[in-house]
Amino acid sequence: MATSPVVPEKRPSEELNRAVIFLGPPDAGKGTQAKQLAAKFMVPHLSTGDMLRENVANGTPLGARAKPIMERGELVPDSLVLRMVRERIERPDCSHGFVFDGFPRTVAQAQYLGELLKQHGFRRPLVIHLRVDTSLILRRITGRRMCKVGDEIYNLYDRPPKVAGRCDNDGGELVQRPDDREEIVAPRLHAYEKQTAPLVAYYTRLGLLHDVDASKSIEEVRQQIDKALLQARAKH
Ligand SMILES: [Zn+2]
């Protein structure tokens, strides 16, 4: 019986070799872009939500401490989150760099991460700031309608159904998800802006922030991110 030879891990021709941090409001395409970039450079896409769930599922000491807090619906304290982040980026799969999605959220977390990256010999991180007009996001989210029969997603402003309230494909009723209502979305966006402003100022001061216009198509946003990466490489 033939045994398959051990194939050395195939790496991309160009390595990322740094941390990339994405800042952007909900629904600005942050997850999509972060995942694409991570896939292109074959590096992990990291979110603290995934890390928490993984630690809980694996029953790690950190997970055991986080679990009751999460079950009460409370915010997991920074001390736990930061230890989790440290353990995660020390794993070998992060040695070629990694992409953060939704972390850091505060200047204190950013400072800790900066120290951590220095300690582990990483270059300065690239910070991608997805900018998009709040009113545009509000339209995207509050205009969204889902078909109750299939998975089709419509938008009252950008992709309206032919008959109001009915799916083009199967005539199913179109409904709005409770979380997409303006009274839920508007405060979330406002909270995001308030929370992120100091972080944007912090990374701007360090010269690490790259603004990307996230109102453009996924492909155009991707190209802007590639350009930012080239600029970062030229600088540090
Ligand atoms: Zn349908």
Image: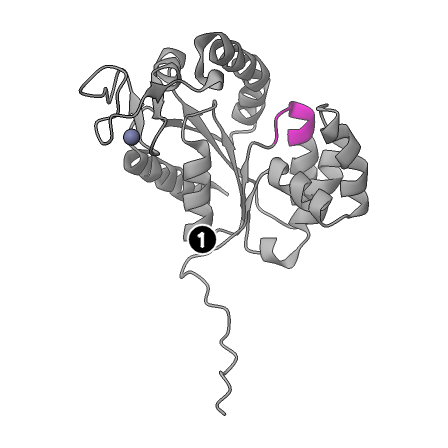
Q: Residue at x 70, y 46 (%)?
A: 57
Please report the bounds of the magenta region as a residue range: 104-110
For this rendering, which residue is in front, 190 or 203? 190
Q: Amino acid at mark 1?
A: Phe
Please say whether residue 46 is visible from this viewpoint: yes
Residue lying at the far top in this picture: please name it.
183
The answer to whether residue 173 is above or below residue 80 is above
Please indicate whether residue 197 sits to the left or right of residue 40 in the image: right
Residue at left offset 32%, top offset 35%: 218
Secondary structure beneath disc 1? loop
> Which quadrant of the frame does ligand 1 lie within?
top left
Q: 47 or 130: which is nearer to us? A: 47
Judge whether residue 160 is colored magenta: no
Q: Residue 22: x percent and y percent?
A: 50, 33
Q: Is 175 left or right of 10, judged from the image as shown?
A: left
Specify the quadrant of the image occupied by residue 29.
Answer: top left
- According to the image, label 1 marks what residue? 41
| Magenta residue check for 108 | yes
The image position of residue 114, as x and y in percent, is: 65, 37
- Position of 227 relative to 42 (above/below): above
The image position of residue 228, as x and y in percent, is 40, 37
